Amino acid sequence: MFRAPSPKAVGAAVLAAALGLAQSAAAQDSAAPSGDVLLELNGLTDSEGDSCTLTFLTTNRLQQGLQRAAWQVAIFDADGAVKLLPVLDFGALIAGKTRVIPFVIPGGQCASIGRIVVNDVIECTAEGGGDLRTLCLANLTTQNRSSIEFGI
């Protein structure tokens, strides 16, 4: 003979199932990439030959790998005039990958740089060849660990 469970037993079972699903989703969320790309100005040092070496890092936190990631930045002098528009090319980045690359900026020591702004995405190509430039700009997060102003 079949006996229906009491409402209290049903409620307890539903609560247990919901908690199990929530814990499972939370574990997946903490392990999954956040869906953005981090570009960080990590440091700067004066270089030989009247130049400045800017150390940038990028982390691909998208759900997919990138065949190539490259951003154009605008480098302003201390008076606010655009000095250079170099391209920071990080090459291929698998999902979750962080890459650190120094870029030598000619034409003055680091103190001559007033600020750096991400101007555009030059290339952001998925591993399968799809164009992700819009995604890589809309989901770009910047971080700064230097004395120079840096952002989007």
Image: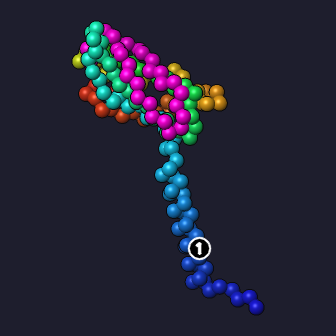
Amino acid tagged 1: Val
Compared with 83, 118 (above or below) is below
Residue drawn where x is 50% and y is 39% of the image: 96
Between residue 46 and residue 117, name the one nearer to us: 46
Q: Residue furthest bottom?
A: 1
Q: Residue furthest left?
A: 111
Q: Quadrant of the N terminus?
A: bottom right
Q: Position of residue 137 (x, y in %)?
A: 49, 30
Residue drawn where x is 50% and y is 50% of the image: 31
The quadrant holding residue 83 is top left
Residue 59 is a magenta residue: no
The magenta-colored residue range is 84-110
Between residue 135 and residue 90, name the one nearer to us: 90
Q: Position of residue 34 (x, y in %)?
A: 49, 44
Residue under label 1? 14
Q: Position of residue 88 (x, y in %)?
A: 44, 21
Residue drawn where x is 41% and y is 14% of the image: 85
